[in-house]
Image (cartoon, rainbow, N blue to C red):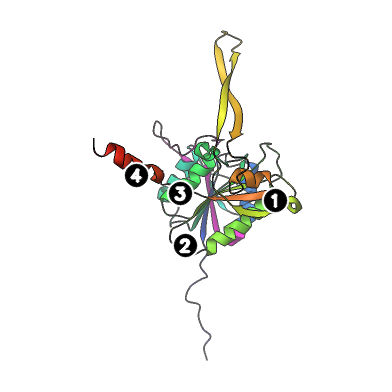
Amino acid sequence: MLPKIALMEEYKPLILITNDDGIFAKGVKELVRAVKDLGEVWIVAPDRAQSGKGHGVTLDMPLWYRPAKFDEDVRAFKCSGTPADCVKIALFKILDRKPDLILSGINHGSNSSVNILYSGTMGAAMEGALHKIPSIGFSLLNFAPDSDFTTAGEYARKITEKVLTMKSEKPVCLNVNIPYDNPQNIKGIKICRQSSGEWREFFDERYHPSNRRPYYWLTGNFYNFEPDSTDTDEWALANGYVSVQPVTCDCTDYSAMKSLQIGIEGL
């Protein structure tokens, strides 16, 4: 009897990785190490830090991308644009098939509560969601350039494995924030809603030494409006949990629709 011939190789999911701290940031290297054996990994990430760019895209200048040398055995490209630009150019110019999953991060610093609106990390993940691709943004609650991302990488792998096997009506988009702590001190993973809060900001005024013209650095403090609400991301993080917030690109305020229909439609 002749041996059976394999008709096709085992399918490997295509995983696109990006970030907003730049392609050579420590967090993206840890994310690649954590998930590279789960599929075929490609990196398309900004050539420099793009924090705070949100879901912005580049319209006032041309974009370019170039191959980049990366420590791990993956295909990597650096792009001159924002994180959302990186996802767009990956989908329509670089990749030869649609990714099964998009991962963004691991970010230096929290993207919980209203920070999601400013986050380039989550801007990239939400760009993936717009194209109906499961997407996850990972952030570590530490801003130091030499942060230890090992624990964050372990949780990123666990959540990535789960999302790759999930069956859902529509692709998920997740905002994942991870406490900066020893693994034994983290109590687990908690599914959360976005906490209500705001940044109370001010501009630090300084003067240029050559012409004495003023310039400004934006700074401020975050205020949590509901510190005792146990179903929020801020509460989860303050109490030692990894917060997982499902995100949608639909910005409609459904609670306001009825009152607006009554008050405005008849005008």
**In terms of secondary structure, where does tag 2 sit?**
loop
Instruction: Tell me the distance, in whole angstroms, between the alpha carbons under discs 4 and 2.
Output: 29 Å
User: Could you say which disc has been placed on residue 168 in the image?
Assistant: 2
Residue density around tag 1, few if under 14, some if 14–19, many if 20 or more, within 10 Å: some
* Quarter in which the C terminus is drawn: top left
Q: Residue 88, how many percent across, how many down?
A: 43, 45
Which residue is more in the foreground, 56 or 192?
192
Prevailing SS of the magenta stretch: loop
N-terminal-most mark, 1 or 4: 1
The residue lying at 66 percent from left, 50 percent from top is 241
The amino acid marked with disc number 3 is Thr
The residue lying at 28 percent from left, 37 percent from top is 264
Instruction: Tell me the distance, in whole angstroms, between the alpha carbons under discs 3 and 4.
Output: 21 Å
Residue hosting label 4:
258
Residue hosting label 3:
248
**In terms of secondary structure, where does tag 4 sit?**
helix
Residue hosting label 1:
151
